[in-house]
Image (cartoon, grey):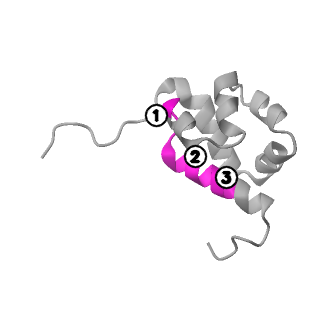
Amino acid sequence: MSAEAHYLFPPARAYQLNRCLHAIKSDPAFCARFLAEPGVAMAEMGLSAEEQAGLVPIDRDALVSRGAHPYLVFMADLRLRMARESGSLEYF
C-alpha cells in the first residue's frame, strides 16, 4: 500500500472558484444568472480573470489546475449543458 495521498483537497486559494462551481451546480437562480450574464455572475463570486477564462467555456484542465474540484467541474458543466440544451439530456 502506498503512503502517498490518493486525494488532494482543493487548496484554500480556490475557495471562490469551487463556490462558484457549486452554485452553478446547485442553485438554479445562480445558474440562470450565469447563463444570462456570465461576467456579472463571476464578478459576484469574486473570481480572478484566469478563473473566469476557465469557466467560459468550461475548461476542465485549466480549472483543475487552479484548484477546482473535478467533481464540481463535471457537475457544473453538466448543469449548464442541461440548461442550454433543454430536453437533450433528460435521461442522463
Comparing labels 1 and 2, the label whose residue is closer to the camera:
2
Residue 48 falls inside the magenta stretch: no
Residue lying at 64% horizontally and 50% vertically, measured from the top left: 76
| Element on which disc 2 rests | helix
Residue type pointed to by label 3: Ser
87 in relation to 57, above or below? below
In the picture of the structure, the residue carrying the numbered disc 2 is 73
Depth order, front residue of 81/15: 81
Asked if disc 3 and disc 1 are in contact, CB closer than 8 Å, the reply is no
Residue type pointed to by label 2: Val
Comparing labels 3 and 1, the label whose residue is closer to the camera:
1
Residue lying at 80% horizontally and 38% vertically, measured from the top left: 38
Q: Gap in Å between the C-alphas at discs 3 and 2?
A: 12 Å
In the picture of the structure, the residue carrying the numbered disc 3 is 26
Residue segment shown in magenta: 65-79
Is residue 37 toward the left or the right of residue 2 in the image?
A: right
| Element on which disc 1 rests | loop
91 in relation to 53, above or below? below
In the picture of the structure, the residue carrying the numbered disc 1 is 10
Q: Gap in Å between the C-alphas at discs 1 and 2?
A: 12 Å
Q: Gap in Å between the C-alphas at discs 3 and 1?
A: 19 Å
Percent of width and height locating residue 56: 72, 39
**Mark 3: few/some/many CA within 10 Å (<14, 14-19, 20+):** some
Main SS, magenta residues: helix
Q: Earlier in the sequence, mark 3 or mark 2?
A: 3
Depth order, front residue of 30/42: 42
